[in-house]
Image (cartoon, coloured by chain):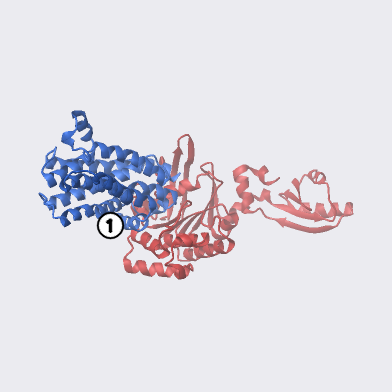
Chain colours: A red, B blue
Amino acid sequence: MEYAIAVQELTKHYEDVTAVNHISFEVEKGEIFGFLGPNGAGKTTTIRILTGLIKPDGGKAFVAGYDVLKNPIVAKQHVGVVPEVSNAYVDLTARENLALIGKLYGVPSQKLRENATSLLKEFGLYEVKDKLVRVFSKGMKQRLLLCMALVNDPEVLFLDEPTSGLDVESARLLREKITRYNKDRKTVFLSTHNMEEANQLCHRIAIINHGRIAAIDTPENLRAQSMELQYIEVAFNKIVNTQEFSENPGIAKAVPAGNKVHIYTADPSSVIAFLVEYAKKNNLRILSLNTMMPSLEDVFLKLIRGKEAVIQ
Amino acid sequence: MSSLTEQFKRSLVIAEKNIKIYYSKGPVIIFGLVFPLFLALAYVIGRNIPLKEVLPGLIGMTTFFTATSVGPSIVPWETRSKTLERLLCCPVALWTIIVGDMLSSFIFGLIISIIPLALTLFLGIQLLNFMMLLLGLIIANLCFAALSVLLSAYPPTDIPATSMMLSSLVKFPLVFISGVFVPVEQLPEWGTVIASTSPLTYFTDMVRQLFINNGFYPLVLDFLALIAFTTAFAFAAIKLHEKTLAKRLS
């Protein structure tokens, strides 16, 4: 099978720091692939290698079937990029920015005009197409950057923190556009800090930490692999001593959370029976009781900092 | 497949972008227009020398200052405004961008340096060979444009003013050692040795020969030296920018 992105043993050092440490993964065609990790984990370095901006110290990388290290310009011809640290030219208009990028991709002028007009309309920028980008809001600039990344109709789209710092409405619009772009069987490589965004958008997620891949799977499977992080959230009509719960062998840990208690357990049904019995015995009323599955954020924290970081 | 021709076309696209954005920037106007104008006035006013003898130095100085005024600021400016990474994500080589920057600097220098040349024609001053002067002007502008882009490579700053200031530190001494104010043949021996290290020396010498038939080096040597300097500056600019790119992006 030919992958949209294939990475083998990719490594990059910056002086004494190993930013990316022998990572390998594949992204299938038509997939939205999330790349999660804390600051300094190696996300941006990986994207910069895949988009031909920097050279790795070891390993191989293929994008759209082309070797990024041997043929970076040919590989770049097939991708669109919204870099993490990037901006449109504020002294040019929105239309001029699109024309510039389109020409640098060698898009024929007629096709470029059509693509630019259609993208500007789709992203709600057509009315301001002849205004200098200097007067645009952050949301408008970010939409324009996405238009610039799409103007060559790329096979693979790299997005490095595309919704970072955006207002809710602009972030939602961008997420909608990413989903829509993916419907045409185009591949999206999304680096994000936003767990909910990754959960909503991505078919699969890779979690990177200290330059190494900690896990790769679907959001559902990642959660299922961390069932020890599931917990029961219970609220009583009075404050209870959580120490008493810890004596139960089925309970891993009980953590007060406001007027509720989070009880971590691998066996929710027996703990629920225990809680009902406990309430009766102590003349308490259960106000609410919910079984909570681990969130992607819990899974992320567990992989990055260990289980104890989540259960506290 | 991005061939050499295709990359050169993209250099022209980058040059077009630079013309739109950077020609009207304050430092470019000051260092490329205002400064050479006042320096030229200071050079001409009060000197009891025939215009034909003044013009070679004037053309040399104007060409040098204008052709080196755009280049030093582009890369620092693009680093600061976060547009450099956006540009590098496109299917262009780093040399494509550097050549684009050189071209925009070259065009600016060429347009402005045409003014003293037009003045020459307007005043009816006889030249030995006008076409040769035009060719020399083109090569000199290319040479100084390449030098200006080289000057923006190190240190890898994102502050255009720093780059402009450092380039001025190189440009001013070059003007004084290049036979602009005092012809090379009137310099002491050690002066001629120092002058031979500056590309501006060869341009001024060439212009002087074509105006008053009085030069220090053979005309062919002036042309060859300028071509050699251009090649060396362009090559060094590309290599040095490649070396400092990671720091700019970090």
Residue A185: percent from the left, percent from the top?
45, 63
Q: Residues within 10 Å of mark 1 (few under 14, many from 20)?
A: some
- Residue nearer the viewer, B195 or A116: B195
Residue B39: percent from the left, percent from the top?
29, 45
**How many marks are shown on the rendered structure?**
1
Tell me the residue at 22%/48% (across/down): B59
Tell me: A78 left or right of A20: left
Query: Which image quadrant for residue B229?
Result: top left
- Residue nearer the viewer, B211 or B249: B211
In the picture, the quarter occupied by the C terminus of chain A is top right
Q: Is residue B218 visible?
A: yes
Image: A20 above or below A101:
above
What is the chain identity of the residue bearing mark 1?
B
Residue A123: percent from the left, percent from the top?
48, 67
- Residue nearer the viewer, A92 or A108: A92
Tell me the residue at 11%/50% (across/down): B127
Q: Is residue B145 visible?
A: no
In the picture, the quarter occupied by the N terminus of chain A is bottom left
**Residue position marked by numbered label 1 in the rendering:** B9
- Residue nearer the viewer, B44 or B79: B44
Element under disc 1: helix
Tell me: A39 left or right of B143: right
Residue A271: percent from the left, percent from the top?
77, 51
Which residue type does callout 1 highlight?
Answer: Lys
Tell me: A247 left or right of A70: right
